[in-house]
Image (cartoon, grey):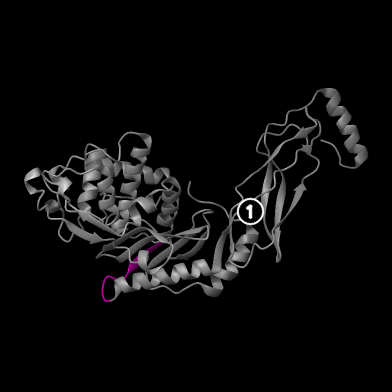
Amino acid sequence: MLKRRVPLLLLILLASSLEAQAPVLGSRAAALIDTATGTVLYSKNGDEELPPASLTKLMTMHLVLEDVSSGRVSLDDIVSLPPASWARNQPPRSSLMFLDEGQTVSLREILLGLAIPSGNDAAMAAALYLETSVEAFVDRMNREAQRLGLTSTSFVEPSGISEYNKTTALEFARFCCFYLVRHPEAPAAYHSVRQFAYPRASNVPAPLRSRPGTIVQPNRNELLRLFPGVDGLKTGYIDEVGYNIALSAERDGTRFAAVLLGAPSAGQGERIRTNDSLALLEWAFSAFKTLRPEIPEPEPIGVWKAKEKNAALIPGSRPERTVPKERGRNIRFQTVINEPILAPLPAGSAVGEIILFDDDGELYRIPLTLKNNLEQGNWFKRLWDSIRLFFMGLGRR
């Protein structure tokens, strides 16, 4: 569901840029995708299954935001906090939001606790608020992964602490693209917020409000301050694979999603993750851009053996494409129709192309398709058009 095809000509154009300049990364696996087109621009061990660590929380957040969108829950809901969600009951070395017994916390705060300090307690609170048990929530996570076509992605718990959660760099990058399109408000509302203070006076029982014990935690994503344009998404760490990160960055109308898995857990792993992220984003923005041409509205075309004389056309695909950074100047268009167009034909049938050119030649082609069903005319119309086509040298059907 999340895969897209790239035209052959563009693949050739992109391949030269990829081979000439692609960075060498220390992370075990990585992938980078143009979110607008789905074009994979970088992959290193992209199909290797590895634990996502706290990147898992993006799926947890996605399900929360889906329920908010559907009206099942509200961001202002007060979330119940069963013992399984208290900070003190999380596994050792957990990252925490610091939830505790007796607190009053909104679902919006839970989302911030997931995105900024990466709270395992926040993940448990979200799971148990949306479903009757953690197991039921995990089942929903896995059903959503399968629905999205993430066949190598599976979860056993909602926080990412388990090494038995699995994904690949390519699949998770595709999920990030989907997440960004589905929840465009999320980067500004949650993932790019620089710090999180909790609990505040409003979160704790009345006797504690004069001294609520507020803990201020910075966003763990260093790239927010190191690379202009980064606005998310999530960092992660797990002993079994090392340091992970899911990135979202936008410049001049081009947005990339990148996933890096397995910067070494020993030595300078965190620094390697940061340096790899910087190198990958610098390369991507220097080499590629999303081209969004304004396609001229197709003119109706003449058709044969049909009830109507003309048929309306529409583009058969979106016009956005990923192109090398230097391409796309002075775009021109040429329309080609595969004459003759003979009824009957169903709506959506490809009947031609719009060819896009720039100063360096052809860029890519967009199919032209029938807007409506093309129905046959009566016997006289079909006979008359057959005679005309014969004498025009266009043959008959």
Q: Is residue 162 among what the camera can see?
A: no
- Residue 236, magenta (yes or no): no
In the rendered image, the quadrant that contains the C terminus is top right
Q: Is residue 265 left or right of residue 23?
A: left
Of residue 143 and residue 204, the one placed in the foreground of this image is 204
Q: Residue 212: percent from the left, percent from the top?
A: 12, 52
246 over 68 or under it: above or below: below
Which residue is label 1 attached to?
293
Q: Residue 234: percent from the left, percent from the top?
A: 33, 58
Q: Residue 288: percent from the left, percent from the top?
A: 55, 65
Which residues fall within the magenta stretch?
259-267
Residue at the image point whose x is 57% and y is 70% from the top? 17
41 over 128 or under it: above or below: below
Which residue occupies the extreme bottom position in the image?
A: 267
Q: Quadrant of residue 138?
A: top left
Residue at the image point whose x is 93% and y is 38% from the top? 391
Q: Residues within 10 Å of mark 1 (few under 14, many from 20)?
A: some
Q: Residue 170: percent from the left, percent from the top?
A: 43, 58
Which residue occupies the extreme right position in the image?
A: 391
Kind of residue indicated by mark 1: Pro
